[in-house]
Image (spheres, rainbow, N blue to C red):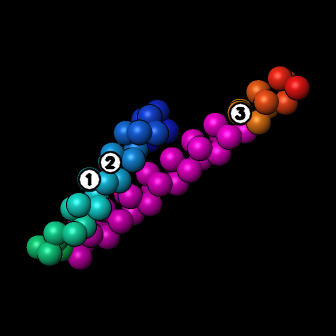
Amino acid sequence: MSKIGFEKKLEHTKDILKKLQDPKITIEESLKLHKEGMDIVKAAQEQLDKAKLQYEEFSKDDT
């Protein structure tokens, strides 16, 4: 999951949310989608944290 770009992760979570809003979805499928979505959000957050650290290091070098 980490090789997927941040924007693609956001798109994928939006797709999952749309599927979860379907009233015909089964409990099993909704639990599977929920876990998948949470994994994607976690990976995206890690990606943001890494980018923030890189930015902070870059900013330190500039001063």
Please tell me whether mark 3 sits on a helix, a strand or a loop.
helix
Does the magenta portion include 50?
A: yes
Magenta region, residue range? 27-53
**Callout in the foreground (1, 3):** 3
Neighbor class of circle 1 (other Cα within 10 Å; few <14, some 14-19, many 20+) is few
Q: Position of residue 52 (x, y in %)?
A: 68, 40
Is there CB contact under 8 Å for labels 1 and 3? no
Which label belongs to residue 12?
Answer: 2
Name the magenta segment's main secondary structure: helix
Give the residue drawn at x 46%, y 39%: 6
Vertical arrangement, residue 14 with respect to residue 23, above or below = above
Q: Residue at x 38, y 58 (%)?
A: 37
Would you place residue 43 above or below residue 17 in this image? above
Q: Which amino acid does label 2 sit on?
A: His
**Left or right of 8, for residue 21:** left
The three-letter code of the residue at mark 3 reads Tyr
Task: Give the residue at mark 3.
Answer: 55
Q: Which of marks 2 and 3 is nearer the N terminus?
A: 2
